[in-house]
Amino acid sequence: MEEKTEATISVKNPLYISFETCLSLLGRYMTSAANSTLIEVTQIARQADNLHWILDILINRQIADEFLSTWSAQTQLSVIHTKVPSIDMYEISRITTIGLFLF
């Protein structure tokens, strides 16, 4: 049982580092898209896709709890979500929808 825990921790750390990086970039791109005429559609879609991919891996390994609690605490993204183009709203909503089904 200890081996499984250690293996889970060693796999979890790089995935969560990637998650935090993608989340940070997503927030930056969404803020930029919401506050200007510069639309970061490609970058927002890329980060949302990366987050979706990471979430899929975490779900498969049954270690998605921290992802979901962190994602649900993103109040700034919630506010910005309504101010970005529809295509970006869709990309972000995909991640939220998966999280809702897990709880």
Image (cartoon, helix red, strand yellow):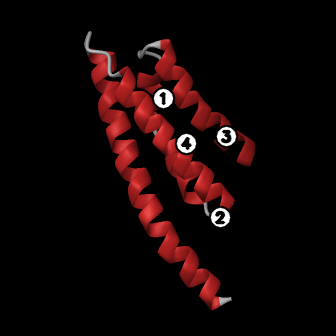
Amino acid bearing label 4: His
Q: Nearer the viewer, residue 83 or 43?
A: 43
Sequence-wise, the earlier of marks 4 and 2 is 4
The residue singled out by tag 1 in the image is 78
Image coordinates for residue 36, horizontal then vertical, percent: 25, 13
Q: Nearer the viewer, residue 54 or 28?
A: 54
Amino acid bearing label 2: Arg
Image depth: mark 3 or mark 1 in front = 3
**Res. 99 visible in picture:** yes
Sequence-wise, the earlier of marks 2 and 3 is 2
Sequence-wise, the earlier of marks 4 and 1 is 4
Crowd band around label 2 with a 10 angstrom C-alpha radius: few (<14), some (14–19), many (20+): few
Question: With 66 as the anchor, is 23 left or right in this view?
Answer: left
The residue singled out by tag 3 in the image is 98
Q: Secondary structure at mark 1?
A: helix
Sequence-wise, the earlier of marks 2 and 1 is 2
Q: Disc 3, disc 4: CB below 8 Å?
A: yes
- How far apart are the alpha carbons under marks 3 and 1? 16 Å
- How far apart are the alpha carbons under marks 3 and 4? 9 Å
The residue singled out by tag 4 in the image is 52
Sequence-wise, the earlier of marks 3 and 4 is 4
The residue singled out by tag 2 in the image is 61
Q: Which quadrant of the structure image shows residue 64?
A: bottom right
Q: Secondary structure at mark 3?
A: helix
Q: Disc 2, disc 3: CB below 8 Å?
A: no
- Residue drawn at x 34%, y 43% is 24
Image coordinates for residue 93, horizontal then vertical, percent: 58, 28
Give the answer, above or below, for where 24 lies relative to 84: below
Question: With 2 as the anchor, is 33 left or right in this view?
Answer: left
Question: With 98 as the anchor, is 83 left or right in this view?
Answer: left
Q: Secondary structure at mark 4?
A: helix
Amino acid bearing label 3: Ile
